[in-house]
Image (cartoon, rainbow, N blue to C red):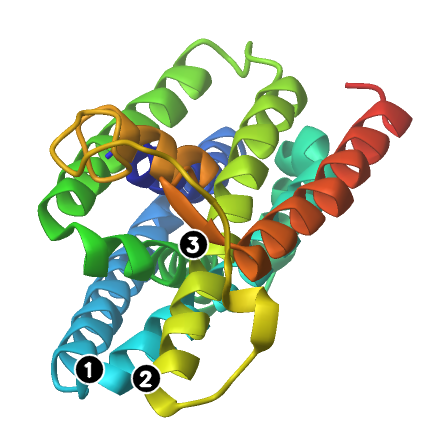
Amino acid sequence: MLGQYLVTFREAFEAALITAIILSYLARSDRHIFSRYVWYGVALAVTASLTLGAIVWLTYGMLPETFKLIFEALTAFIAVLVLSSMIYWMALKGGSINQEMEKRVKIAASRSARISLSSLSFIVVFREGFETILFLTPFLVADTMATLVGMFFGISSAVLLAYGIFVVGMKINLRRFFYFTSIMLILLAGGLAGYGTHELLEYYEETGVKVGWLSDPAYTLSIPADSPFHHKGAIGSIFAVMFGYTTSAEWARVIVHIAYLMISLPLVFWVYRKRRV
């Protein structure tokens, strides 16, 4: 549930923060009459995101077992790609997100405000909703209830934090905030990359495709399935979601996991240090 919470919190926080920036700018520039069009866009984006999520979930339920494996692998890899690009974008823009969004709102408000502001808020919120769906699909498949609970608390705390930031006047150091959450999300993405590789290997096994030593176990831990430290246990499941922990992993899974971390972590460190966290 912790991993699901972190992903949902990060995405919901970004959407809520940008929405708060838009509303704050409209209020400060005596254009608060246009605020309702922002809320129209937000409501439409939330509805579209929930609808898309339901479609993805129903589609998965109708797939044969073999195709479920490839579906889980593909969604995991897509989630890693989108998550990685989002982390990199926030590394570049996180510290100046306030100024950048106010420029966009100023342009939108000077044109046909109804359509422009509704479209802007819709795009912002729906993008985060779509990314959240991609990230959480593998978790939703593995543990539906924990994922839903994590989503609820993630969205709730993100909205409260975004509101609090603007009540106290943007006192939090957003760049530092995004720096530390980016590191956590890279660790989570590494685990997703490994999980996707594992599901792909299972698909190959089901379809009779041989990949040689890559499908051989790289390690196996002597931890019983009923132990809380098993990757499906109370404690182990937290580390499984956050860091890709498992009691047994194939060579391909280990290689992909480590390779992702070796590339992504130094890149994020370099970008933030270059721009002075």
Provide residue 66's location: percent of width, then percent of height.
Answer: 26, 85
Residue where numbered disc 2 is placed: 206
Give the number of the mark in front: 3 or 1.
Answer: 1
Q: Examine the rendered structure and indicate whether residue 186 appears above or below residue 71.
A: above
Residue where numbered disc 3 is placed: 128
Q: Residues within 10 Å of mark 2 (few under 14, many from 20)?
A: few
Mark 3: which secondary structure? helix
Q: CA distance from mark 3 to mark 1?
A: 30 Å
Label pair 1/2, CB-CB below 8 angstroms:
yes
Q: Is residue 147 left or right of residue 171?
A: left
Q: Residue at x 39, y 46 (%)?
A: 248
Give the number of the mark in front: 2 or 3.
Answer: 2
For the C terminus, the quadrant is top right
Residue where numbered disc 1 is placed: 65
Q: Is residue 187 left or right of residue 2?
A: right
Give the number of the mark in front: 1 or 2.
Answer: 2
> Given the image, on which type of amino acid does mark 3 rest?
Glu
For the N terminus, the quadrant is top left
Q: Residue at x 70, y 29 (%)?
A: 95
